[in-house]
Amino acid sequence: MTGTLVLGGARSGKSGFAEKLAIATGKELVYIATAQAGDGEMASRIAHHRSQRDARWITVEEPLALADALSRWCTPQRVVLVDCLTLWLSNLLFSGGEEWPDNDDIALPPRFHAERAALLQALTNCAGDVLLVSNEVGMGIIPMGAISRCFMDEAGRLNQAVAAVCDRAIFVAAGLPLYLKGAPC
């Protein structure tokens, strides 16, 4: 397995860059989408991403059980692109319909810990190539509200853990890659 983490800010070009890396492998293309269309704006974003991919892609929608999806779809003849880890993280944080306090400690739902651990294990066991797209959210102002700070902290921890098990980590800004770990593709 070759694992690659592609990080960047919103509209940095990270998803398009990851898609180009996947296509360049010449393997069967699988796109695991973690987004859920909870409103019209998010539905538009999902439609935009779908329009960027042609018929070569198999699209799998999986907002929560990412490790299971990787286990099902990772094979030596495929490259699996997961877009994106931060949406997946949000899905997990809000999967139980919790109401989070504005300024109190956050007790993460048990499913969060189980799914995160399962993802890291699945990445070490993948039989095929995996590209994971994630937002780098820790480069700006510390957000207001306990759940927003918790999300930022957990996204940073997740990115670090995924980068540790991946062969490559690439930061994309203005559509340009900066290789943080591993050789250029």
Image (spheres, grey):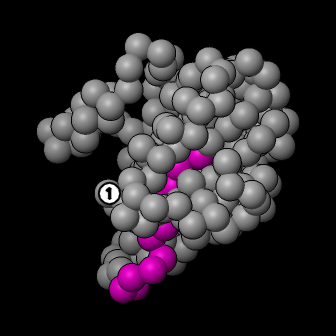
- Please tell me which residue is depicted at 59% across the width and 46% down the height of the picture: 132
Above or below 132: residue 156: below
Q: Nearer the viewer, residue 5 or 104?
A: 5
| Residue 18 image position (x, y, % from top left) | 52, 44
Q: Amino acid at mark 1?
A: Arg
**Secondary element at image label 1:** loop
Q: What secondary structure prevails in the magenta region?
A: loop
Bounds of the magenta span? 132-142
Q: Is residue 122 magenta?
A: no
- Please tell me which residue is depicted at 39% across the width and 71% down the height of the picture: 148
Q: Do we see residue 29 in this rendering?
A: yes
Residue bearing the label numbered 1: 11
Mark 1, other Cα within 10 Å: few <14 / some 14–19 / many ≥20: few
| Residue 23 image position (x, y, % from top left) | 55, 30
Report the quarter where the N terminus lies.
top right
**Quarter location, residue 9:** bottom left
- Please tell me which residue is depicted at 63% across the width and 53% down the height of the picture: 5
Q: Do we see residue 63 in this rendering?
A: no
Residue placed farthest to the top in the image? Answer: 55
Answer left or right for 153 relative to 180.
Answer: left
Q: Nearer the viewer, residue 116 or 45?
A: 45
